[in-house]
Amino acid sequence: MAQEQAPNLECTAEAFRRYCETARNDNAPLYEQMAGRIREDPELLEIAAHARSDRPTAYLFFDAVQYLVLGGTDHEVARYYPSVTEDALPAAFAYPVFRDFCRKNADLLRYLVANHNNQTNEVGRMSAMLPVIGEAARRGGGKPIGIVEVGPSAGLNLIFDRYLFDYGRTVWGDMDSSVRVVCRLEDDRLPPLEKGIPNVAYRIGLDIEPIDLSSDDSARWMLSSTWADHRDLSLMQHQAIEVLRQDPPQIVQGDALQVGEVLKDVPMDLTLVVYQSFMLMYLTPEDRERFLAVLAEESRRRPVYFVSMLGAGIGGGTRRAKVDLHSWVDGRYEVQQMVEGHSHGRSIKWVAGATA
Ligand SMILES: C[S@@+](CC[C@H](N)C(=O)[O-])C[C@H]1O[C@@H](n2cnc3c(N)ncnc32)[C@H](O)[C@@H]1O
């Protein structure tokens, strides 16, 4: 038995080593410190190793622990979690307490990591996508837009027009919103959103495994994926869930390749804007081509704009992303990178040339 587990624990330890590095780069001292210690702790590695081998073990383990903390606990571990404690105790002293909590809840944690997946829906990403959606609307003639998000997860980014976006030098969106998405501009260029957030007249999502936020348990699991160190983001995600619950957007369950069925329902008098963030990477290269071919097919009926946010490696120590605008207009296909920035949209740079 011990022999069978050894390779598995080695892989698990490696997952925590990589996680530790990512947490360091993303300024998450609690998760950095815990991951650094877990990788040398066979007892906690054994618990984490119950995750399916095709799933992100270390992420799932931290999700599972935070899921229990968010559920409310008398254990001292909560005092180290910035997501639930305003002046959290220093991460450097957390490990013995964290370890004790994990050992006391070992069976529950084994169950959670074995039966769940890491499910994220990052509201911050809209600060990178929004100016590009605005550009698509502008190219479409300034009409109201019909939006189709592919891979929207819980749908938090389908209601971006109910949030306030704060780029430091300017703000856009719903000034009364309880959700304030803060984004730093990496240079002095303002993205061209002079007309503010486009008017969204129709919205729909398509996801292979949508999350239903009307369930408190699903909402808690999803919140547990926001890193505990990032208290401001946890609070923002929490607020966004409340806003969504007041009027949830429609999300159809299905594969991205079925997007043609969803496009048919978008009224023809609107500018059609399809978008995705961190979904395309789940498709094979062949299926990505097929997906783009469905959009090209739709462009025989009307112009199609597709805003696509994908990872762009590591830069300056953090995970980067880029946002491209694909367009099919009057039989002509073009693709142009418009934005680059932090993968969760914490900072962005408008890289498109002049937008005539
Ligand atoms: C990493 S999450 C990103 C969620 C959201 N777009 C965001 O940026 O916060 C990826 C989402 O894509 C969905 N997904 C994965 N493969 C898919 C497919 N073949 N068709 C539709 N959705 C898919 C997943 O269910 C999940 O909700």
Image (cartoon, rainbow, N blue to C red):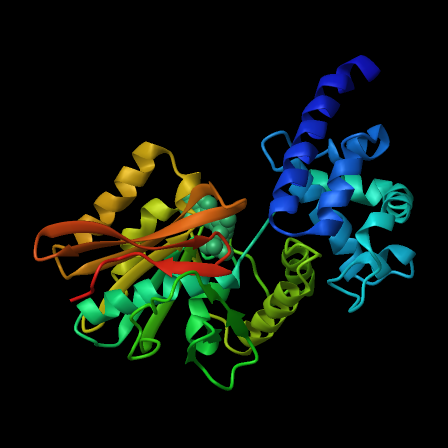
- Which residue occupies 32% across, 37% down? 287
Q: Is residue 224 left or right of residue 202?
A: right
Q: Image quarter for residue 189?
A: bottom left
Could you tell me residue 302's position as x and y percent?
A: 14, 62
Could you tell me residue 335's position as x and y percent?
A: 22, 50
Who is closer to the viewer here, 327 or 111?
327
- Which residue occupies 79% across, 54% down? 68
Q: Is residue 209 visible?
A: no
Extreme residue in the front direction:
188
Locate the C terminus and report the quarter of the image it occupies.
Answer: bottom left
Q: Is residue 244 left or right of residue 127?
A: right
Who is closer to the viewer here, 233 or 300?
233
Identify whether 34 is placed above or below 231. Answer: above
Q: Is residue 204 left or right of residue 156?
A: left
Who is closer to the viewer here, 339 or 190?
190
- Which residue occupies 27% across, 72% down? 145
Q: Image quarter for residue 32?
A: top right
Identify whether 85 is placed above or below 195. Answer: above
